[in-house]
Image (cartoon, rainbow, N blue to C red):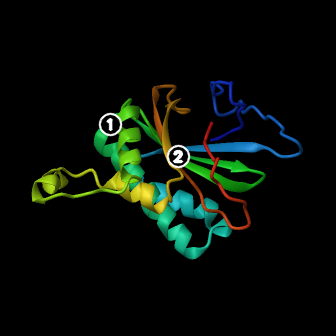
Amino acid sequence: MDVLLAPTQTPPPTPEQPVQIPAENCLIRVTAWRLSREGGPQQARRLLRSHVAEHVDGPALDEADVVVSELATNAFVHTDGPCELRLVQYAGFPIVCEIADVGVQEDIVAKRLAEALTPAVVADDSDIAHLDEGGFGLSIVAALAKGHCGVRPTRLYHSGQVGKGVWFAVPALGRRSCDSATPG
């Protein structure tokens, strides 16, 4: 489903009613796909690759592939509801990829992303006892996205349910730095 939104608008009620908002001869385009619970991470990787491959070099595409797979896996492991892959494009270039789900743990995700970007200091073996609890995925996301990632509250386009979106900037070729790229 393609949805074209202004920052203050809500999603259209059906996919047949997209809203187009021009922005100085270009459009911001949000495309959302509902991911199936069976094979959702693979579906997310396939969709991402098919829509950004011409704009992203090989190594960066491989890293984006790992990131989207990790985010989709987290969405299915930690929630029971639907999940979506979203791709935000500006003037035809992919700039942000997001996995949205019905989870509401934005504060936990934000904390883990922030911790992943903070250098760790380990004093002794007791400091690493918590490492067997998992939670490495968001560290991988933050590292591969080079810190250009985050979480926000959102509403799923396909179901209308409230949840969260975990996003990362797509490292597109021929585009200026994405330091300020956020999904809105």
The amino acid at mark 2 is Glu
Residue depicted at 41% across the width and 39% down the height: 110
Q: CA distance from mark 2 to mark 1?
A: 16 Å
- Relative to 30, 146 lies left or right: left
Instruction: Report which residue position mark 2 lands on.
Output: 98
Instruction: Report which residue position mark 1 lands on.
Output: 79
One can see residue 114 in this view: yes
Q: Return the mark for residue 58.
A: none
Residue depicted at 52% across the width and 25% down the height: 160
Q: Position of residue 19 (x, y in %)?
A: 75, 31
98 to 22, vertically: above or below: below
The amino acid at mark 1 is Thr
Q: Pick the residue in front: 129 or 64.
A: 129
83 to 142, vertically: above or below: above
Residue depicted at 41% across the width and 36% down the height: 82
Question: Would you call the spot at circle 1 few (<14 residues within 10 Å), some (14-19), or many (20 or more)?
Answer: some
Q: Quadrant of the N terminus?
A: top right
